[in-house]
Image: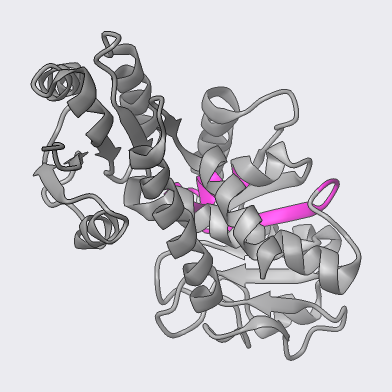
């Protein structure tokens, strides 16, 4: 009798996300086991407890999901997990803190397709503002876009924090293409004069782009908002929008709403959870792999 698929799900938070648990079971993991309030230094012990108890065949039906709310911490945990394997005792692992990696991947993939199909453009060379971008979704979206060749600026309420986050993601997640900048909300009107794409990634219910901003963004092509809770993060953009014109835009900008992004996010997370238990070799998955899946999905529609 073959052993069941078991996914060990760790988080630094008090509770494991029910969303992630549901996604894992729907993707084919028979049993999900939560570990909460996990510290970074505990990851190695948890991994090695998981790999040595099932034998070389059983570990192929074992995986680890890394949640939490901090992108840097999640990527550190993923790295520790991969370094803790003792061949042939190896399991796959997938980091997606707060669903940020798959959400960001879904948003960027939708915007990329919209740029190509409606505006005959691409991410390469595009000027992108990530509004409310100091959080995990904004960080991941900034890095994915910068690696695709975009000029990215993270915008937040405090200049010092925006610059600190920009420096962190460049250093920790970037490559030779990334030169992500940080700016404050006060810089927004000036930055919008040369902006092609806006990502709204602030907390739910906070509007980061108003009617006046939209009217005074002369080359804005696409705006995307990950929040479905009213009011919209972008004036005139509905959660259901999927390439709809944004009212008041003088540049003919189109919008991508939270539900359109959420659909792609779902397929990206589902795809990577399935990849873990279908792969013959261990895989270690994060935002780049999420973008590959999201991009493939939107291009197939």
On whether residue 129 falls in the magenta region, the answer is yes
Query: In x, y percent, where is residue 112?
Result: 73, 59
Query: In x, y percent, where is residue 90?
Result: 29, 19
Q: Which residues are magenta?
A: 124-142
Specify whether 234 is left or right of 253.
left
Compared to 261, does 46 lie above or below?
Answer: above
Q: Residue at x 13, y 24 (%)?
A: 46
On whether residue 245 falls in the magenta region, the answer is no
Q: Residue at x 23, y 62 (%)?
A: 22
Q: Nearer the viewer, residue 75 or 201?
A: 75
Q: Nearer the viewer, residue 193 or 204?
A: 204
Looking at the image, can residue 108 be seen?
A: no
Residue farthest to the bottom, as pictured: 247
Compared to 13, does 262 lie above or below?
Answer: below
Compared to 37, does 207 lie above or below?
Answer: below
Q: Nearer the viewer, residue 217 or 93?
A: 93
Query: In x, y percent, where is residue 191?
Result: 76, 57
Q: Nearer the viewer, residue 210 or 272?
A: 272
Image quarter (top left, top right, bottom left or bottom right) of the N terminus: top left
């Amino acid at each position: 009798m073959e052993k069941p698929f078991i996914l060990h799900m760790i988080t630094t938070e008090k509770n494991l996300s029910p969303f992630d648990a549901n996604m894992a079971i729907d993707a084919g993991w028979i049993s999900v086991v939560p570990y909460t309030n996990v510290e970074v230094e505990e990851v190695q012990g948890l991994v090695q407890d998981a790999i040595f108890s099932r034998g070389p065949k059983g570990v192929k039906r074992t995986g680890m999901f890394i949640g939490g709310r901090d992108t840097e911490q999640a990527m550190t945990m993923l790295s520790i997990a991969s370094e803790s394997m003792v061949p042939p005792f190896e399991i796959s692992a997938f980091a997606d803190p707060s669903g940020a990696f798959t959400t960001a991947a879904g948003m960027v993939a939708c915007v990329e397709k919209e740029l190509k199909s409606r505006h005959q453009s691409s991410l390469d060379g595009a000027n992108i503002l990530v509004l409310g971008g100091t959080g995990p979704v904004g960080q991941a979206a900034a890095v994915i876009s910068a690696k695709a060749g975009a000029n990215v600026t993270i915008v937040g309420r405090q200049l010092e924090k925006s610059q600190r986050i920009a420096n962190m993601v460049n250093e920790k997640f970037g490559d030779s293409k990334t030169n992500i900048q940080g700016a404050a909300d006060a810089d927004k009107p000036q930055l919008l004069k040369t902006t092609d794409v806006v990502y709204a990634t602030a907390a739910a219910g906070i509007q980061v782009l108003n009617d006046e901003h939209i009217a005074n963004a002369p080359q804005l092509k696409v705006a995307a908002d990950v929040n479905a809770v009213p009011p919209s993060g972008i004036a005139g953009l509905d959660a259901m929008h999927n390439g709809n014109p944004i009212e008041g835009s003088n540049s003919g900008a189109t919008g991508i709403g939270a539900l359109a992004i959420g659909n792609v996010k779902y397929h990206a997370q589902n795809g990577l959870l399935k990849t873990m238990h279908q792969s013959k070799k261990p895989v270690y998955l994060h935002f780049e792999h999420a973008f590959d899946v999201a991009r493939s999905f939107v291009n197939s529609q």
